[in-house]
Every structure is written in C-alpha cells, then in structure tokens.
Image: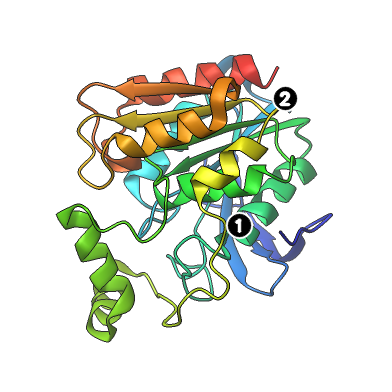
Amino acid sequence: MESLEEPRFARSCFSSITSGGQRAVLLTADGVRIDAAYVPPAGSRAGERDIAFVVAHGFTGALERPAVQRAARVFSEFGGVVIFSFRGHGRSGGRSTVGDREVLDLDVAVAWARKLGFGRVATVGFSMGGSVVLRHAVGGSVDAVVSVSSPARWYYRGTAPMRRVHWAITRPAGRLVSRLGLRTRIHGEDWNPVPVPPVEAVPLIAPTPLLIVHGDRDAYFPVDHPLSLAAAAGDAAELWLEPGFGHAENAAPPALLRRVGAWVAAQAG
C-alpha cells in the first residue's frame, strides 16, 4: 500500500457544515483531490486532541450525506472526527474504483487527522468503506479499526441489491445512472491486479484492536460475511451481530454509533 508521511493540502478553509470545524482538500499519493472536513470534539471534550475518528462511507455516500453527518455528530461526543468523500463521490475528484485505490483516500485522511494534532486515530468504515479500513489497517498506521457491514470477499452477487450494484459498476448504462442520479463517478476498467480481499486482510491487522459490526437484516451481505471475517481474525477481533440492524451508515441508529464510539475510546486507549 502506498502511503504519505504527510498529506499535501491543495486548499484549506473553514466550513459551514461543521461548528468550529475545518474543510480541506487533500491530495492522495496518486494525485486525486479528496474533499474532507474536520468536526471537533463536542461538549466536555471540546479542545481535546486525544482520539480522532476517521469515517469511511459506503458506496454512493459522501461527507454531505445525512447519515455520514449523523455519524460524525455522534462520534464527536468521544473525540475529533474527520469525514471525507471517497474518489468519484461528492465533490472529490477522480473516479471510484469501488474499494481498490480508495485505500489511498483513507490514508491521506488519517494523515490529516495526525496533522491536526491527534495522538490516536481510529478508522470506522461502512460497507465499501468497511472493506477499505480493513485493508488499510494492515499497514499498522491506526490505533483501532471498526468495520461495519463489510463484505468478506469480492464479486459477491448472492443478493438482489448486490446484483444491482454490480450492474451499476460494470455496465455503461449503470455507470451513467450512478453519475447522474447518485453523484458517483465509477471507473470503467476492471481491477488489475485484484486487491487483497477483506477476509485475507483481517488476520494481518493484529495487534491493532478490531471490531466487526454487522446486522442480521443486512440486505446486501448475509451474516456469513462477518462470520468469515471474525473466523479469519480469530481472537484478535470482536464481533457484534446486531439484531434488527440493516446495512451500513444509512441504517445505523445513534445508539449503535454511540456504542461504537465508546468501544473505540476504550480500545484506542
């Protein structure tokens, strides 16, 4: 995995979407501009530079999406928060590679959190972002990892929602719909080489604390995905199978996000 010792900042300014926060454009190792925002710790933690949460959204998400904003607000109760839009999403540049080179996007967001002065950084990823945080954590550059609603393996088409996702990714008409309707620009070429699948990455994350969260009502990836991830990680991972929980950040209630925030605060210590 390519890495940056320090991100290059194309632009930095205060943002209206945060309260006392900061908006920046970050430049990845392969030259893609990433739209990012910093949300400072809330309440009694205001002004602290202890723990930062870097939130990696799911496919077709973006930092402006209400679900990402909700997660940022909850996590700010436990520390600072960096949210960003993956390449090809929202105001970020480039085109989505659906979990491959997005590792570079996460890497520059983590580096920005360090530059902001945080001594400990945790990554929290949802769906596509969940697979990205697992692969990124192999480098040992973070202090805790939470993967929510992640696939265990690539090319899964076992559910109707995932068959629709593959249509959007692989067909020109699907990519057009994604660009016009979902503000998601998708790269039209196949992976070459194919990145390491999440189930092969998780055994390499230890000793970094790892939490795998999945819902028993996930319409995209059934529970054999988190079970496979947990089995591959062994005792190095904690697994939460959440009754009634659906898929990723859009379905995550504040109570679950708050539990995740408390887990990170405890484990990253």
Please provide percent x and percent y for residue 177. Answer: 23, 76
Which of labels 1 and 2 is toward the front? Answer: 1
Q: Amino acid at mark 2?
A: Asp
Residue 82 visible from this viewpoint: no
Q: Quadrant of residue 138?
A: top right
Residue 163 appears left or right of 234: left
Can you give x and y, in whole percent of width and height, for residue 37 in the image? Answer: 57, 50
Q: Is residue 209 left or right of residue 249?
A: right
Residue 49: quadrant of the picture: top right
Q: Position of residue 38 (x, y in %)?
A: 60, 44
Q: Residue furthest right?
A: 5
Q: Pick the quarter of the image with the C terminus.
A: top right
Where residue 52 is drawn, which disc sits there? none
In space, the residues marked 1 and 2 are separated at their CA atoms by: 24 Å
Q: Residues within 10 Å of mark 1 (few under 14, many from 20)?
A: many
- Furthest-bottom residue in view? 172
Residue drawn 30% across the image and 28% down it: 253
Residue drawn at 33 percent across, 72 percent down = 169
Task: Choose top left, top right, bottom left or bottom right for residue 164.
Answer: bottom left
Between 4 and 37, the residue placed more toward the observer is: 4
Q: Is residue 91 above or below residue 262?
A: below
Dividing the image into 4 quarters, which one contains the N terminus?
bottom right
Q: Which mark is residue 50?
A: 2
In front here: 153 or 12?
Answer: 153
Count neighbours of disc 2 (C-alpha within 10 A) and say few if under 14, some if 14 to 19, many if 20 or more. some
Q: Amino acid at mark 1?
A: Val
Q: Which disc number belongs to residue 103?
A: 1
**x and y, in percent, of residue 40 in the image:** 61, 34
Of 197 and 58, nearer the camera is 197
Secondary structure beneath dot 2 equals: loop
State whether residue 100 appears in this view. Answer: yes
Q: Residue at x 25, y 58 (%)?
A: 157
